[in-house]
Image (cartoon, rainbow, N blue to C red):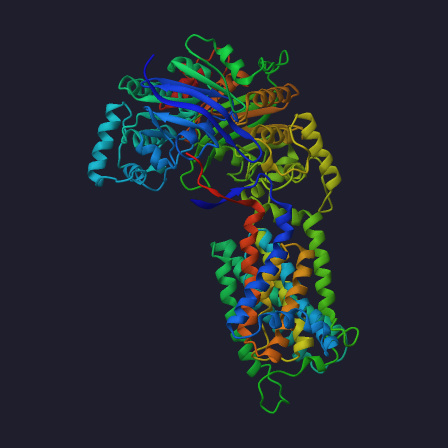
Amino acid sequence: MSDTLLSLRGLTKVYPAVIANSDISFDIGAGEIHALLGENGAGKSTLVKTIYGLHRPDAGTMTLNGQPYAPSEPRAARAAGVAMVFQHFSLFDALDVAENIALGMENPPPMRQLAQRIRDVSNAYGLPLDPARILGDLSAGERQRVEIIRCLLQDPRLLIMDEPTSVLTPQEVEILFQTLRKLRDEGTSILYISHKLEEIRALCERATILRLGKVVGACDPREASARELAELMVGTALKPPTRAAGAGAAQGEVALEIRNLSAASPRAFGTALSEVNLVLHKGEVLGIGGVAGNGQDELLLALSGEMRTAPGSVLLAGEDVAQLPPNERRARGLLAAPEERLGHAAVPDMTLIENAFLTGAVREGLERHGFVDWRRTRGFAEKVIATFDVRTPGPDRIARSLSGGNLQKFVIGREILQDPVVLVVNQPTWGVDAAAAAAIRQALLDLAAKGAAVIVVSQDLDELMEIADRFAALNAGRLSGSVPVEGLTIGRIGLMLGGAHDMEVARAEAG
Amino acid sequence: MAMIRLERRADPSNFWRYGAPLVAVLATIIAGGIMFALLGKNPVEAIRTIFWTPFTGRNAAYYLSQLPIKAAPLVLIATGLALGFRAGIWNIGAEGQYVIGALSGAAVALALYPMEGRWLFIICIAASLAGGMLWAMIPAVLKVRLGVSEILVSLMLVYVAENILASLAVGAMKNPEGYGFPGSRNLSQYPAVANLDIWSGTGIHWGVIAALLSVLAGQILLSRHILGFQIQVAGLAPRAARFAGVAPGRLVMVCMAASGALAGAAGWFELAGPSGIVSVDFNVGYGFTAIIVAFLGRLHPVGILLAGVLLAVTYVGGDVARSSLGLPAGSIQSFQGMLLFFLLALDVLTAYRIRIGRKARA
């Protein structure tokens, strides 16, 4: 085992309502890739933010290279050789790559010199990047490269990566892993945060597992089985979702059809949809994979009715709904649950009762002559809470006070209980703990088994493989043809997601 | 090193949501006292004169009757403004809509003078509602069609309205029997349209009734009606509002129209009663003070009613203090402004708590 680079002793961080980290101690060796494994809400982010100087611990100490280490701010952490690539990038769409990198540096060199260094470093690590390109035009994978290069220019001794693969295609993941291995071989330590077990088994030589703010185990992930790791992480045995016999097999009537749907994005630097076609049958779950930012949000807006599209481009059970507003579509049974829970799918500062009315008004009959029937709305909210095991003291709590997983169960449950003809969900389990994610997936499968058509848009390919009957890839606003999930390999999916060949591959598969 | 930090609360504090206005009043009294002291007045005396003398002094009956007269336009305007403010639509130009509403009512009244019939009063109210509404439609349409800031347009239109008022007061609406003095006929002496006290000497005129009705209607709208729900969603989470099927443009039009109409009616009730005459200095800033009233009342109709009465007290008491202590008029307006300032500052405490502590241990 290598020498210790960073050692943590008894780190504790308490928030008003929750203990985020409790007495955390472990060591990261020099030149090792160390996995920090845990569910959402296990305290991983709090811990790495402490290491990066964004939080100060309430108790405990850190030692870096034998010296006491207590960064008061990220600048101090960077000066000590600690760099971090965040899950959510802090980049400016309107600036170019070199400008974005210069913004994150203490003393940026002259632009021309910086551009040359960016080229050198990016080529040295197999992450080619043109310093003159505008950020808004880059894919999520390329944006991540910008963040990584920004870190590498500081020659870090410890590189922290927070869920780096959540935005990458399988091929991009492989490139990233090669880069990380090369860095390790040069002596850089990497703290790699993830909840994806296979990745960690492929990349890391040591793992520390957190649950509910505490260290619950440490192991060599190459020797432990994925199942062991998962059960350590979750604390209970996991039950994979089950599918009712025969579901998805029979081809029902056509529930939803999208014909030549092209539409500009309502947002700056959004992705325009380009000639999207799809046919969805009753009882079918269609998984739409793809890296975020490839038109997922736009597709959801076009289906929910927040964005109107050309007449005839969206047909619900044969009826043209492309020009109808959201509530008219709801009345006809086309329901949607957007990705962003707080601020889009739900109003953060409104109670669950009010949030139940938000989308339930039409189909649940919560509206009487223009007035809100609060008694019935409360009943509906309570039904969602009870049916979907939403953990909350009561329906009078505001949405913001719920954990991500519980609010997501509420949002998805609110749509499912309205008995949709077609349900479209975007990233249904993003940032949700494993138990809640399993419950949500099961609920979607049960809904399809009852005859509804379901579209699941997700970046999590494992999730799509688990619940979808058919798979299609969304890439730069274009949707590939859909292929049956059975027999589909990750490699082939990667090709569908990745680039120019996807259409051909998809067509060949579909044909 | 000691330092002060703001830490987000897990749940908004109910104590501060309702306590902040009270603490803001207290802070205003202290800061206002300091201001009065710096002006060379006895601060205790000044504060007592503003808040106490009107109700205990020799002329208490008169001053008490002034309270509903001052509070009614504030409450009527603020209730309308609160609808828009809740939805994130910022009508800052109620003062202009107030003036145009008053002029619209006056135009009808003066055109039909000396026709008899109490129904004329109703026509004039309708004209003032329409006038204020149309004036508010200018920023609303510009906002919806061209994305122009409603804040700037509505504010600028105040000055346009004031110039229209000035030109009419000395021009088209000038009293033909007024011996050449500027100003219109005294409408409060034209029985068909006069807005007089319903019970003589109480100060309760039809505008007061309208203000109370608007509070009631606003309360029902916000707590039970679907439009009120949409207004709140739009203000709290615009994307969620669109998801829920709220058409943002329509909401801008509705909220601007409602606040403009109520401000216009307030103008007419004032003109036909307490003021009487279309004159160059007819408007005294109710449209701006109503913004303070709306926020002080937590954008909540019942709260606005209470806040309107409080601000009316500062108007009445301020007048007393001006005449008996010689306080400058500007100092009373500063006093009212401080109220908004402290309230907005204290509002931070609803969502955040203050932590005073030493820098964390290493």
Q: Which of A460 and B257 is in front in this view?
A: A460
What is the x, y in percent for residue A246?
62, 12
Residue A367 found in image quarter: top right
A391 and A505: which is toward the camera: A391
The answer to which of A182 and A383 lies nearer the viewer is A182
Q: Is residue A287 above or below residue A365?
A: above
In the rendered image, is residue A334 in sight? yes
| Rendering coords of residue A6 (x, y %) | 36, 23
Quarter of the image where the N terminus of chain A is located: top left
| Residue occupying the point 58% across, 40% down | A348
Q: How many labels does the image show?
A: 0
Q: In which quarter of the image is residue A306?
A: top right
- Give the vertical position of A461 relative to A350 (above or below): above
Residue B249 in sight in this render: no
Q: In the depicted view, which residue is nearer to us: A44 or B353?
A: B353
Q: In this view, does B128 lie above or below B356?
A: below
